[in-house]
Amino acid sequence: MATKRSAEEIQRLLEGYRQRDVTRVEYCRQQGISIHTLAYHLRRQASRTRPRLARVKLTPAVAASGATFVLILRNGRRIESAWNFRDADLERLIGVAEAE
């Protein structure tokens, strides 16, 4: 039966692999683990740190209110503005709005 590893042990194994200049096969042999186990945990960690994308819907018409920018969030909130956002400002606005 497979050994259940703690989150700390998994993290230690992954950090150890990244710090050493050896192949996956050699590292797994040294640690006494399956190469499939290492690959699984590397993929799992990568999927957790990968930014998630949000589905958006584009509409061709500008809102009747004269806004040049309209953002509709997942929770249904709608932000309309005539302000031209810089990328950093828009990213900050979305982050703040989505955090609530």
Image: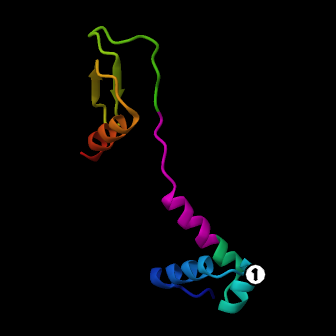
Q: Residue furthest left?
A: 100
Q: Is residue 48 magenta?
A: yes
Residue 75 point in image, percent of width and height:
31, 37
Q: Which residue lies under the disc numbered 1?
A: 25
**Image-based side of 40 in relation to 49, left or right:** right
Identify which amino acid the numbered label 1 is placed on: Val
Q: Is residue 89 magenta?
A: no
Q: Quadrant of residue 8?
A: bottom left
Q: Residue at x 48, y 51 (%)?
A: 51
- Pick the quarter of the image with the C terminus: top left
Residue 74 point in image, percent of width and height:
36, 36
- Reply above or below: 23 against 70: below
- Magenta residues, start to end: 40-55
Assign a secondary structure to mark 1. helix
Residue 22 point in image, percent of width and height:
72, 81
Q: Residue at x 69, y 85 (%)?
A: 28
- Pick the quarter of the image with the N terminus: bottom right
Q: Quadrant of residue 95?
A: top left
Q: Residue at x 69, y 80 (%)?
A: 21
The residue nearer to you, when weighing 81 against 76, is 81
How many circles with numbers are drawn on the protein?
1
Q: Residue at x 34, y 33 (%)?
A: 73
